Each structure stands twice: as C-alpha cells, then as structure tokens.
Amino acid sequence: MAKKKKKAIRLQCTECKKVNYFTNKTKNIEGKMEFSKFCNDCRKHVMHKEMKK
Ligand SMILES: [Zn+2]
C-alpha cells in the first residue's frame, strides 16, 4: 500500500501569533489559507493564517 503524503499546515493567530490549529492542505486550494477561528489567548474569533516554515 502506497502512503499518501499529507501537507500538514499550521494556522497561526494573526494577533498573538500563537499556533492554535492544524490542518491538511488539499490540492484544490491554492495560495495561503485563512480561517476565522476562536483563539484562546485573544478570547475572540481572529483570522488565522497559514504559517510557512
Ligand atoms: Zn490570538
């Protein structure tokens, strides 16, 4: 069985810069991914952006 490579990406809070979420990038999505997610440090919904190494 061949293993499929998954591109794991980290989602970083745009305000406190903390990495709160992990997700896998699909082939359909190009460019940077952005999500509005709840940040425990900011205690509100903040835009989380894909973090590049
Ligand atoms: Zn935050």
Image: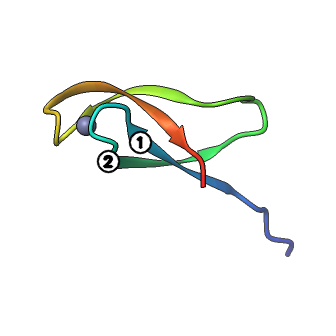
Q: Which mark is residue 20?
A: none
In the structure shown, which secondary structural element does the residue marked by tag 2 occupy? loop
The residue carrying mark 2 is 18
Total numbered circles? 2
Q: Mark 1: which amino acid?
A: Gln
Q: Residue at x 34, y 47 (%)?
A: 20
- Mark 2 CB in 8 Å range of ligand 1? yes
Residue 36 appears in which quarter of the rendering? top left
Give the image quadrant in which the ligand numbered 1 is located.
top left
46 on left or right of 24? left
> Is residue 42 left or right of 30 when viewed as pictured?
left
**Quadrant in which the C terminus is drawn:** bottom right
> Does residue 42 lie above or below 22 as drawn?
above
The percent coordinates of residue 22 (x first, y second) are 46, 50
Q: Earlier in the sequence, mark 1 or mark 2?
A: 1
Per the image, the residue denoted by label 1 is: 12
In the image: residue 15, left or right of residue 5? left
Q: Amino acid at mark 2?
A: Lys
> Distance of mark 1 from mark 2, alpha carbons?
6 Å
Pointers 1 and 2 in contact (CB under 8 A)?
yes
Which quadrant is home to the N terminus? bottom right
Residue 5 location in percent, x, y? Answer: 76, 62
Q: Label 1: state its secondary structure.
A: strand
Residue extending farthest to the bottom is 1
